[in-house]
Amino acid sequence: MMKIEADECRAALTLIRRTIEEHCPPGVLPSEEAGNGLYGPELIHEAEALAAAIVATIEKMQLRVMMKPPAPSIK
């Protein structure tokens, strides 16, 4: 089994965090400081915060699709 160093994990999580911050709705991902308070200070806690942000984004997208009125049909 390959062991991944903590620095590599941290770099990967940072890349995912930046991507979520750039492309997901505002408010789905707490700041790193707030995330430490909500989830904890370890790398696994950052991963939990990122996963929750992805789920929240999907839920917001699904809600938006469900709330959107159907397009008028052209006959």
Image (cartoon, rainbow, N blue to C red):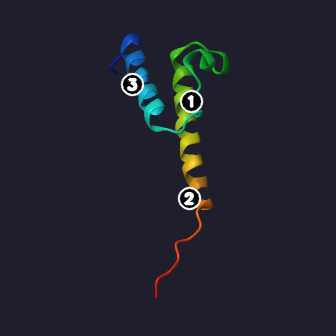
Q: Earlier in the sequence, mark 2 or mark 1?
A: 1
Q: Amino acid at mark 3?
A: Leu
Q: CA distance from mark 2 to mark 1?
A: 21 Å
Pointer 1 local density, CA inside 10 Å: few below 14, some 14–19, many at least 20: many
Give neighbour class at mark 2: few <14, some 14-19, many 20+ (Cα, 10 Å): few
Disc 3/disc 2 C-alpha distance (Å): 28 Å
Disc 1 designates what residue? 29
Q: Position of residue 48 (x, y in %)?
A: 56, 27
- Check the image and name the residue furthest to the right: 38
Local secondary structure at mark 3: helix
Determine the image quadrant of residue 66: bottom right
What amino acid type should be assigned to the residue bearing mark 1?
Answer: Leu
Q: Which residue is mark 2?
A: 65
Element under disc 1: loop
Give the quarter of the figure containing the N terminus: top left
The span from disc 3 to disc 1 (Cα, nearest Å) is: 14 Å
Residue 39 vertical position relative to residue 69 in the rendered view, above or below: above
Q: Is residue 34 left or right of residue 2?
A: right
Asked which secondary structure carries label 2, the reply is: helix
Does label 3 or label 2 sit earlier along the sequence? 3
Q: Is residue 69 left or right of residue 20?
A: right
Name the residue tied to disc 3.
15
